[in-house]
Amino acid sequence: MDINHNDNLIYKLSNMSDEQLKDVDLSFHLVRLQKEADQLYQSAEIQLAPDVITWLKKNVVKSLNGLKQADETENKVFLVGDYNHEISINDQIAKFTVNEEYKELSDKVGKLTTSLSNPDPEYPEKDTKFQIVKLTFNNETAYFCYYRSIKKNSMKASSKKILVYKNASQYEFVDDTMIDLGGSIDFFIVNNYIYIVSAQRFENAFVYSDHMIERRDQNIEQIISMPFFDSEASNSKMFQESCKKYAYSRTLANINSETMAAVQKNFDARCKELSQIKENEPKDQTAKERYIAKYGILWGLFEYIDLKNRKVIFTEDASPKPLIHFFANKIVKSFVTEDYKVAVAYE
């Protein structure tokens, strides 16, 4: 269901009055990551005073409305685009659909929500990595994440600044855990969707860089298993190692199953087109230079593909970048100039 649909939980919450918010249940949780433990997440449920709960509900609503922007009809809505591994689009919320294609991430989301239902009485508050505000309304639940730790007040005489609070008629030291509440939401989860405001904090919370590397490696393995990589000149293992530089990881991880299938299905047809482009190369030097400039990135592929035998060629000193652009479907034709260039990203 679209996030701006009247029946969507997030949209409903964003439009609730203070009176309607009384029917929304709230629980507040501290969470930490345990990368080496069987349970990836450990949590504690923190009991908040009634007036704090009321304030926090209102703050979530205020933060949600702060994420809305005017659409073409000047209505305030959530502007949402699909999550992209390569770039962050600052003026949109990124939506990540958690499905079987991203099973590892799906498992992590499940582990996170399970940990919230099973708080640990021995939870070490000082190791908190982020906070979760869980809102439930009419048996629907949304999880709002704030990626921030807790604070511990220092009472050392050498401290430049300490905190005190008023207790009856006098001020006393704050000598306990302090928690920042409210503020900017980093991401929120509803059903099988993660809505991401801060991509970096989303990746931190789910150790997503590890998953990105895994997807990169899976995609490389799939590419080099295709028929056009089965010649000795393809040097598939050399290509594989060259692709494992971090600079290429996001682009490779972003290749989806549909694009991968299209690469294998259409490789011969693209080779045929490249052969035609090469055959039509002008003999006049000036015309040739304009012709090569027009085809730009496509021209560079002639060094990497044996067009006659329909095989990839990869050498020891070669950069994998042109082939990565090809496999990731990044080579596009400008509608205005008709030149061929590399697309930075897709909406």
Image: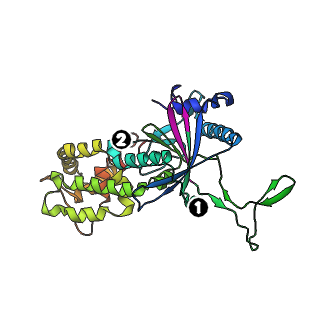
Q: Answer left or right for 252 relative to 136.
A: left
In this figure, which residue is indicated by the disc labeled 1?
126
Residue 332 versus residue 122 in the image, above or below: above
Q: Is residue 314 visible?
A: no
Amino acid type, mark 2? Asn
Q: Residue furthest right?
A: 169
Label 2: element kind = loop
Q: Is residue 99 visible?
A: yes
The location of residue 185, given as percent across then percent down, is 58, 46
Magenta residue span: 135-147
Residue 209 or residue 333, whichever sits in front: 209
The location of residue 125, given as percent across then percent down, is 58, 58
- Mark 1: give few (<14), some (14-19) or many (20+) Cα within 10 Å: few
Tell me where residue 179 sits by quadrant: bottom right
Question: Which color scheme did the rendering employ for the protein?
Answer: rainbow
The number of numbered discs placed on residues in the rendered structure image is: 2
Residue 20 versus residue 227 in the image, above or below: above
User: Which residue does the image show at 48% across and 56% down from the upper left?
Assistant: 204
Residue 96 or residue 164, whichever sits in front: 164
How far apart are the two marked residues, 1 and 2, measured between alpha carbons? 34 Å
In this figure, which residue is indicated by the disc labeled 2?
99
Residue 295 or residue 214, whichever sits in front: 214
